[in-house]
């Protein structure tokens, strides 16, 4: 074989190998992992009857942890107050379930039920539950601000009214943060729904984790008027999923009841939005509105 042919074949082999290397370099990258993998919504429903008090616990599937909470009162249309929305867990233990408790605000003859919602995910690094409890006395108003431990962010929320048994209502349940800022704290405020002589207190619960990619807070506010009912749906931005939520009643100071606080999704689909619905508990002539908050992370 001539020297010219040998050199031509050698050059061809080198070019082929170079082309193969180029193909490897430009191959599509593996998609990024979800910020909160395995996210689903679990529900549990109480019996339907006319009993004054209902409680239900929604528990995450084995191997998953609780990132957020929700509830729904079915059939009572403002006559029932959710007294407890209590995630389990602690300052060194990840929550795995939420207990919801509700009382009739006034005697109500109709049948009603209570649904508890647990937003659950595969284990999330650093997930814990933080708490703050207000003073216990007979004042008309309570406020509790619970902040995540330093370096952690807020994925979900909860509260508990202690000693009021249907005579106090949560008016604000507000995560901080914004469209470009991760929430890190929760403000919970409550008023007596009717005059109540007993002592009571308010506990705020924050579900917190190590920084979560893309975590933000979205918000939607209804019109302001004197209608009896409000509903607001807060939807996560495109490409994000719902880890938790909150709400705020503006201008009604104890006369409004959030009847629905319902994340969408299912046991096989991640939530991406939350619906908050509120009724006047008693006739109220003033103007008021409702804000729904969604806590969202990268899908």
Image (spheres, rainbow, N blue to C red):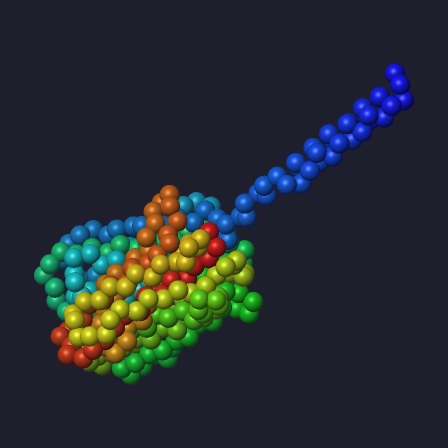
Q: Relative to 3, is 216 above or below?
A: below
- Looking at the picture, tell me which residue is in the foreground, 215 or 196: 215
State left or right for residue 31 relative to residue 102: right
Relative placement, left or right, of 7 versus 45 is right
Q: Judge whether residue 151 can be spotted in this image.
A: yes
Tell me which residue sits at (46%, 51%) in the image: 299
Report if residue 132 is visible in the image. Answer: no
Q: Quadrant of the N terminus?
A: top right
Q: 29 or 10, which is in the foreground?
A: 10
Q: Quadrant of residue 292?
A: bottom left
Q: Is residue 191 above or below residue 72?
A: below
Q: Quadrant of residue 107?
A: bottom left
State whether residue 168 is above or below residue 238.
Answer: below
Question: Residue at left 16%, top 63%?
Answer: 77
Residue furthest toward the right?
3
Image position, residue 297 (x, y; %): 46, 57
The residue under the point 90% across, 22% down is 3
Measured as percent of width and height from the top left, residue 236 is found at 39, 58
The residue depicted at 30 percent of the width and 61 percent of the height is 233
Quarter occupied by residue 115? bottom left
As drawn, the residue found furthest toward the left would be 109
């Amino acid at each position: 074989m001539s020297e010219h042919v040998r050199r031509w074949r050698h050059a061809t082999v080198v070019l082929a190998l170079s082309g193969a290397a180029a193909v490897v370099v430009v191959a599509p990258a593996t998609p990024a992992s979800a910020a909160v993998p395995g996210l689903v919504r679990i529900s549990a429903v109480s019996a339907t009857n006319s009993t004054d008090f209902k409680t239900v616990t929604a528990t995450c599937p084995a191997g998953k942890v609780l990132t957020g909470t929700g509830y729904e009162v079915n059939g009572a249309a403002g006559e029932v107050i959710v007294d407890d929305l209590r995630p389990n867990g602690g300052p060194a233990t990840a929550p795995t379930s939420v207990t919801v408790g509700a009382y009739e605000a006034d005697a109500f003859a109709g049948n009603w039920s209570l649904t508890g919602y647990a937003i659950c995910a595969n284990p999330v690094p650093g997930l814990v539950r933080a708490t703050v409890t207000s003073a216990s006395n007979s004042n008309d108003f309570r406020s509790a601000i619970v902040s995540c431990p330093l370096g952690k962010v807020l994925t979900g929320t909860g509260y508990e009214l202690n000693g009021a048994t249907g005579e106090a209502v949560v008016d604000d349940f507000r995560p901080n943060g914004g469209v470009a800022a991760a929430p890190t704290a929760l403000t919970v405020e409550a008023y007596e729904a009717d005059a109540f002589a007993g002592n009571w207190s308010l506990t705020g619960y924050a579900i917190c984790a190590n920084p979560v990619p893309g975590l933000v807070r979205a918000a939607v506010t209804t019109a302001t008027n004197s209608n009896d009912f409000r509903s607001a749906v807060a939807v996560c931005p495109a490409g994000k999923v719902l880890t938790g939520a909150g709400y705020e009643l503006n201008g009604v100071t104890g006369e409004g009841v959030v009847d629905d606080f319902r994340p969408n999704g299912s046991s096989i689909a991640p939530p991406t939005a939350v619906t908050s619905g509120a009724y006047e508990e008693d006739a109220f002539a003033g103007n008021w509105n409702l804000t729904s908050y969604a806590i969202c992370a990268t899908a």
